[in-house]
Image (cartoon, grey):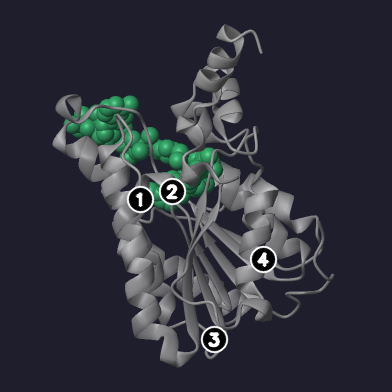
Amino acid sequence: MTFVQGLLKGKVAFVAGGTSGINLAIADALAQYGASVCVMSRDPAKVDTATAHLARHGGEVRGYPGDVRDFGAVERVVGSATDALGAFDIVVSGAAGNFICPANKLSPNGFRVVVDIDLIGTFHVLRAAYGSLRRPGASIINISAPQSTEAFWGQAHVSAAKAGVDMLTRSLAVEWGHEGIRVNAIVPGPIEGTEGVERLAPTPEIREAWGKANPMRRTGTGAEVANVALFLSSEAASYVNGAIIYCDGGQVLGGARDYRESWEALQAAKGG
Ligand code: NAP
Ligand code: COA
């Protein structure tokens, strides 16, 4: 699947948490289709590797280390990126932390750290970027997760944080829409080769079972999520605001809880 080359030529994108996994795949697609891109994350080595990777598309690329939990740091990075590249047309907020831990074993600080990164970090990014957005026409894309609406064992902290991200998305869509700033979110399903999947499905057997349980019988790719981000970044999405868009192969519809195995067992018992 390809979009028109130069789709985002002349646009400037800022991707918070854009140095690995899904967010890097999004930053890569934005750069591939002509946008100047700035990425930010905590680890300076990851920032350097990501900027070198993005620069192969030939456009302007910047990268700055920073923690989204530190509003001052986010403001400084946004200032540097704006000075270097100009006002932002696209902002992606995808920095996140995740680990499995049941609530009765989770320390208050363990709960807080995920809410701090995912939810408060997203507020920091959007609040700091607000003054640097080119309007009308700016597109903000938050990266949510299935946990925002589905409850999973060992994921109370993530559900609390990502549900907040969804409502922040909708609230700011309402507040900023009249300025020509669209605010949407993408909910990726299980995306192969990512830190998130490595943490939640730590063995090949579990990962294979996840793929089989999806209605499309497979996990997704970062590029497939990036395609949704390209759409949301483009003029084609000019009236899409406040949407929470699933890119999950239909997982949210209940693929993980289908009755295929039961049906097959019943057929086998009937000799069918
Ligand atoms: P990942 O590779 O670990 O991506 C997280 C990114 O955020 C990294 O670049 C990381 O870089 C950065 N980051 C983490 N904490 C940060 C902080 N405090 N300040 C600034 N940057 C920070 O994980 P991923 O699995 O691709 O997930 C990316 C996004 O997709 C997340 O929002 C996640 O919730 C969402 N998601 C993932 C899946 C999946 O299947 N993987 C499914 C649904 C939703 P540093 O370590 O350098 O900070
Ligand atoms: N189980 C239970 N609690 C955990 C935990 C785990 N696996 N990992 C961390 N915690 C707790 C810590 O014990 C600590 O609480 P405490 O002070 O009461 O002991 C708290 O969380 C903070 O841990 P710390 O290691 O200091 O946080 P950090 O800021 O260095 O790292 C994390 C943040 C914990 C989210 C880390 O996993 C991370 O950086 N993740 C980014 C990558 C990622 O998760 N990618 C997937 C995205 S879907």
> Quarter of the picture for ligand 2?
top left
The residue at the point 60 percent across, 75 percent down is 84
Report x, y in % for residue 140.
Answer: 50, 71
Which disc is residue 145 wearing?
2
Q: Viewer-proximal residue, 45 or 110?
A: 110
- The residue at the point 55 percent across, 25 percent down is 260
Residue depth check, mark 3 versus mark 2: number of the one nearer the observer:
2
Which residue in the structure is indicated by mark 1? 148
Q: Circle 3 — which element?
A: loop
Disc 2 Cβ-to-ligand 1 distance below 8 Å: yes
Number of other residues with Cα within 10 Å of mark 3, as a class: few under 14, some 14 to 19, many 20 or more = some
Say whether disc 4 or disc 2 marks the residue closer to the N-terminus.
2
Marks 2 and 1: CB-CB under 8 Å?
yes
Give the left or right position of residue 83, taking residue 118 as reference.
Answer: right
Amino acid bearing label 2: Ala
- Along the polypeptide, which appears first: circle 3 or circle 2? 3
Mark closest to the chain's N terminus, 3 or 1: 3
Which comes before the other along the chain, label 4 or label 1?
A: 1
Checking the image for residue 230, the label placed there is 4
Between marks 4 and 1 in the image, the one whose residue lies nearer the viewer: 1
Nearest to N terminus: mark 4 or mark 3: 3
Identified by mark 3, the residue type is Arg
Asked if ligand 1 lies within 8 A of label 3, the reply is no
Q: Mark 3 — residue?
A: 134
Amino acid, disc 1: Ser
